[in-house]
Amino acid sequence: MSTAQTVGDIRDAVAAVNDPEFPGVTIEDLGILRDVRVGADGTVVDLVPTFLGCPALGVIADDVAAAARAAGARAVSVRFVNDPPWSPDLITPAGRRLLAEEFTVAVTGPAFVTCPLCGSVTVEERSPFGPTACRAIAYCESCRNPLEVMRG
Amino acid sequence: MGGWVRYHTNERLFATTVKKRHVMRSWAALEDFEAFLDAGGIVEPVDDMPEEYRDEVFRFIEMHANSELMGGLTERDFIPKAPGMQRKLGTLAKTQDEIGHAHLLYMVAADLGIKTRDQMLEDLYEGRSRFHNVFHYRVHTWADQVAIAYMIDAAALTTQQAVFKDCSYGPYRRVLRRIVAEEGFHMRQGEEMLLRMADGTPRQHAMFQEALDRWWQPAMHFFGPPSSSRDVLLRWHIKSATNEELRDRYVQKFVPQLLDYGFTIPDPDLRYDEPRGRWVIGDIDWTALKQTQLNTGPDSERRIATARHGWDGARWVREALDASAARLESRVA
């Protein structure tokens, strides 16, 4: 059954799974999807979590398995890998645009944050943790909007 | 990096609010402002705005922020009691979520310049301001927790969806967009937890029925009494649907779901209007809602005291952060 077409379908279906907290942003956009292998023994999907304690991992794994099965995959196993770990550099340009629409920016290391709303650099981090442990809360002093910042 | 050491020093936050930049909009008369809102205009913090509008937006957001905070604390109470590791992690994550939402909302509210965040918190802990009715009740069992996750979160989502799509105040609308996405995720967990109870043993089924009996009326009250035709929240596009419309939207969706799962809705006058194809609920007794609005609900006193206890207990952390920020500043100077 693993014709080239099925393999492509499974990969596309898995890549299109949305992040549970960012509807419209896929796991591929966020760089969470590392690998999809379809073999004679079944399908293996490798995901790299944005951080190890992420409470949404179970939901993401369920969604990925369901999407793979719907595209014809059998014996699906979803694994979490962490080497090399996730970093904001893995977010695609499309993913960055979509996150900006959700007032969220992702930066690597202690880099300055530019406001995704007004482009200003007068962004001040206000709390190291926001609604989830992977996002800090910041505030743009120019346009006076709260922002969320993913760091890695 | 670094900036967050002064996250709680609201007084300074006030002093540093940027007033220039962006072209500030202003309106000569209230009619012009209302015409702008009717045309779908979005008000930004840097814009001029009628004081009445500022007051209404502020009150609305303050109540929402207080409710997220009190809701987060309700959730927190169940971290040690959650059945199993998976549920414990879920409860932890949801607590973090709600407190994070409160944090974002207090920033938006404080920015309106009416009260600082500390003043809002003081008012909350002194029982001088309001939070949603559903957080004035006792949470007895895990089934109550499931009822909150399934029924109350859904009620909150129904009202928030109606606000964020058309809300005229920009920063609130943006924060709501994020909150709605995350509440949707909670609802999914709530549905899964409800399914477990509904498909469980007769005892589990009965447990949820008891919780449903306790939470149905608070859920109906959540949407508020019928909106007045002069409601400025509607006139100024802060809300986009009346309380009645939202309650009805909720009833049409959740009554059939709960009945499907084999539960009974505790409303003897509930009926299905065949020709209209709609569920119709009985008259609502508003007595309990009025009590919660006065902070004299069944569990108001204990909840407010618990919240204040947490705030007082963390005073030394705030003082240490202040001292550290002051030292850093004196070194820079």
Image (cartoon, coloured by chain):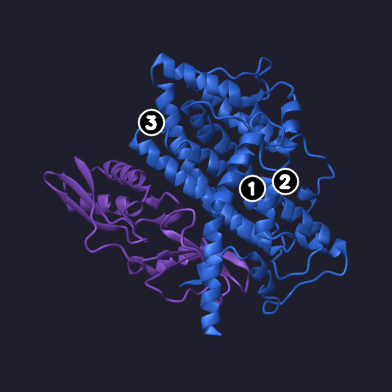
Q: Nearer the viewer, residue A51 or A88?
A: A51
**Tags 2 and 1 on a common chain:** yes
Relative side of A47 to B263, left or right: left
Q: Dot 1: what SS?
A: helix
**Tags 3 and 1 on a common chain:** yes
Label 3 close to label 1 by CB (< 8 Å): no
Residue picked out by circle 1 = B66
Tag 2: amino acid: Ser
Crowd band around label 1 with a 10 angstrom C-alpha radius: few (<14), some (14–19), many (20+): many
Q: Residue at x 40, y 52 (%)?
A: A19
Q: Is residue B75 above or below residue B99?
A: above
**Marks 3 and 1, the one that precedes in the sequence:** 1
Q: Residue at x 44, y 60 (%)?
A: A135
Q: Position of residue B281 (x, y in %)?
A: 68, 23
Circle on res. A64: none
Relative side of A14 to A113, left or right: left
Q: Residue at x 45, y 39 (%)?
A: B188
Label 2 close to label 1 by CB (< 8 Å): yes
Residue sticking out furthest to the bottom: B333
Residue sticking out furthest to the left: A40
Residue picked out by circle 2 = B129
Distance from disc 3 to disc 1, alpha carbons, whole Å, reads: 28 Å
Q: Is residue A141 above or below residue B183?
A: below
Q: Position of residue B207 (x, y in %)?
A: 48, 19
Chain identifier matching the blue colour in the rendered picture: B
Instruction: Name the quarter where the C terminus of chain A is drawn.
Output: bottom left
Tag 3: amino acid: Pro
